[in-house]
Image: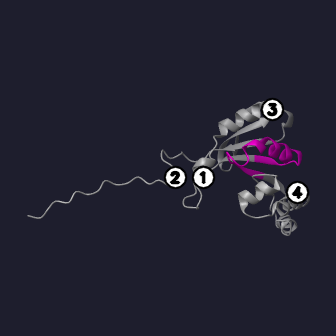
């Protein structure tokens, strides 16, 4: 993003979304399998400097960043960015069992309410109505909550099995 931010702004792009699930370098490597947190943060700074509006997308991961989410929000809002908190979504066969990373956004919201006064709102844009929470001390900044699609009743890697056909002996 660093090398493209100015060109994107000149081309008329007004807003970019950047995925950022942690501000901790070790966790970043664990989550992304890449040691590039500095590069991502530099790209965000370059986009802001180029005049692009930046929205941070953070996936809530039960065992990897749940405790850090308030700090990510504070950082994002301090930099002038809105943030979306996203429930972990089933991705099919990725080699990982994302079922155990799932944390309901309601639980995250309760965690945030311990720290801030939140106001529930609904934002409307081209994509339709979206549930949004505003933090009282940062009225110009929002936290958008994006739930996962309906959770399956079985673990994502379990497939229902069809009953075995009954074979009739030939007579």
Secondary structure under tag 4 reads helix
Name the one closer to the observer, 125 or 32: 32
Residue 111, percent from left and from top = 73, 34
Q: Are marks 3 and 2 in contact (CB under 8 Å)?
A: no
- Residue for badge 2: 156
The magenta-colored residue range is: 56-83
Name above or below for residue 144 compared with residue 15. above
- Distance of label 3 from label 1 (alpha carbons): 28 Å
> Judging from the image, what secondary structure is the residue with disc 2 in?
loop
Q: Secondary structure at mark 1?
A: helix
Separation of marks 1 and 4 at Cα, in angstroms: 32 Å
Contact between labelled residues 1 and 3, with CB atoms less than 8 Å apart? no
In the picture of the structure, the residue carrying the numbered disc 3 is 115
Residue that mark 1 sits on: 98
Badge 2 vs badge 4, beta-carbon distance below 8 Å:
no
Q: Work out which residue is located at the far right of the displayed protein and give it.
A: 49
Q: Are marks 4 and 3 in contact (CB under 8 Å)?
A: no
- Identify the image quadrant of the C terminus: bottom left
First in sequence: mark 1 vs mark 4: 4
Task: Identify the residue at horizontal 14%, vertical 62% (top origin).
Answer: 169
Distance from disc 3 to disc 2, alpha carbons, whole Å, reads 33 Å
Q: Are marks 2 and 1 in contact (CB under 8 Å)?
A: yes
Q: Earlier in the sequence, mark 2 or mark 1?
A: 1
> Which is in the foreground here, disc 1 or disc 4?
1
Q: Position of residue 16 (x, y in %)?
A: 78, 58
- Quarter of the picture containing the N terminus is bottom right
Judged left or right of residue 61, residue 74 is: right
Residue 51 visible, this angle: no
Numbered mark located on residue 48 in the image: 4
């Amino acid at each position: 993003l660093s090398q493209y931010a100015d060109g994107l702004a000149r081309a008329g792009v007004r807003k970019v979304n950047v995925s950022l699930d942690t501000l901790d370098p070790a966790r970043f490597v664990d989550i992304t399998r890449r040691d590039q947190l500095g590069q991502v943060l530099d790209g965000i700074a370059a986009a802001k400097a180029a005049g692009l509006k930046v929205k941070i997308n953070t996936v809530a991961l039960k065992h990897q960043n749940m405790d850090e989410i308030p700090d990510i929000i504070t950082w994002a809002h301090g930099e002038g960015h809105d943030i979306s908190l996203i429930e972990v979504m089933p991705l099919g066969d990725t080699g990982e069992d994302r079922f155990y990373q799932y944390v309901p956004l309601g639980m995250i919201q309760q965690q945030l309410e311990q720290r801030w006064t939140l106001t529930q709102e609904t934002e409307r844009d081209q994509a339709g109505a979206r549930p949004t929470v505003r933090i009282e001390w940062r009225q110009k900044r929002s936290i958008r909550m994006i739930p996962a699609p309906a959770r399956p009743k079985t673990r994502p890697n379990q497939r229902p099995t069809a009953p075995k056909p009954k074979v009739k002996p030939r007579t």
